[in-house]
C-alpha cells in the first residue's frame, strides 16, 4: 500500500502525542458517559411505527345481526334508558362497527344518554386506553374532542353489555 510520506510518521504515534497542548486545552477529552450520549438512538422517522401498525390492521365488513340479537340489544338499550331517567349511572361495554376504520371497536365506560330520536347512545370513557383486557376487538383511545362522550349509532352496535 502506498502511504503519503507526510502522514507516515503519525501511524505509530499515540493520539495524545498528535494533539498539541493548545488543542488539548481548548478541546479537552470527552468523558465516556458524555461521548456515549452522542450515539444514543433517536427516532429519525417519527410516526413510522404507527404507520406500520395502521397498515397491519385487518379491515372487516359489517356483520349482519339476527332478529334475536337486534331484539336483545334493543332490550338492553331500553334498560339503560330507564336507568338514566331515574338518574342511575350505568356502566357499559359496547362493541360497535366503525365505518371510519372499517373494523369493530370496543369501548367501556358510562352511558350518558340514549337518544331514541337519533338512534344513538353516548358513552363516556375516561381512560379506556389503560384497559388491561385482551380482546379480539380494538380498544378505542378517546380523543381530546370526545370529552362529552362517544356517540354510537344503534345500527353500528354489534354487542352491548351492562357492567
Image: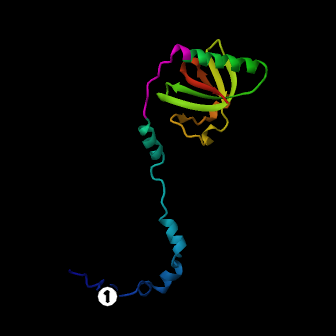
Residue range corresponding to the magenta coloring:
58-68
Q: Tag 1, which secondary structure?
A: helix
Can you tell which quarter of the image residue 145 is in?
top right
Q: Note whether 52 is above or below 147 in the view shown.
A: below
- Give the class, few, some or many, for how many residues have Cα within 10 Å of label 1's Cα (few <14, many ≥20): few
67 is within the stretch colored magenta: yes
Residue 23 vs residue 92: left or right? left
Image coordinates for residue 140, horizontal then vertical, percent: 57, 35
Q: Residue at point 44% right, 28% down?
A: 60
Q: Residue at point 54% right, 71% down?
A: 34
Q: Which residue is situated farthest in the right direction here?
A: 86
Can you tell which quarter of the image residue 68 is in?
top right
Image coordinates for residue 106, horizontal then vertical, percent: 57, 31
Disc 1 marks which residue? 9
Can you tell which quarter of the image residue 159 is in?
top right
Q: Which residue is situated farthest in the top direction here?
A: 117
In the image, 84 versus 7, the foreground residue is: 84
Image coordinates for residue 2, horizontal then vertical, percent: 20, 81
Amino acid at each position: 500500500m502506498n502511504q503519503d510520506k507526510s502522514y507516515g510518521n503519525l501511524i505509530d504515534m499515540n493520539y495524545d502525542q498528535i494533539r498539541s497542548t493548545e488543542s488539548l486545552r481548548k478541546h479537552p477529552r470527552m468523558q465516556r458517559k458524555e461521548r456515549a450520549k452522542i450515539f444514543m438512538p433517536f427516532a429519525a422517522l417519527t410516526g413510522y411505527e404507527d404507520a406500520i401498525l395502521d397498515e397491519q390492521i385487518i379491515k372487516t365488513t359489517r356483520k349482519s345481526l339476527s332478529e334475536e340479537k337486534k331484539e336483545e340489544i334493543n332490550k338492553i338499550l331500553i334498560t339503560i334508558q330507564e336507568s338514566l331517567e331515574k338518574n342511575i349511572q350505568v356502566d357499559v361495554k359496547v362493541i360497535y362497527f366503525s365505518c371510519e376504520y372499517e373494523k369493530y371497536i370496543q369501548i367501556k365506560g358510562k352511558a350518558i344518554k340514549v337518544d331514541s330520536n337519533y338512534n344513538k347512545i353516548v358513552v363516556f370513557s375516561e381512560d379506556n386506553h389503560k384497559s388491561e383486557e385482551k380482546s379480539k376487538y380494538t380498544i378505542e383511545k378517546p380523543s381530546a374532542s370526545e370529552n362529552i362522550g362517544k356517540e354510537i349509532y344503534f345500527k353500528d352496535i354489534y354487542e352491548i353489555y351492562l357492567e
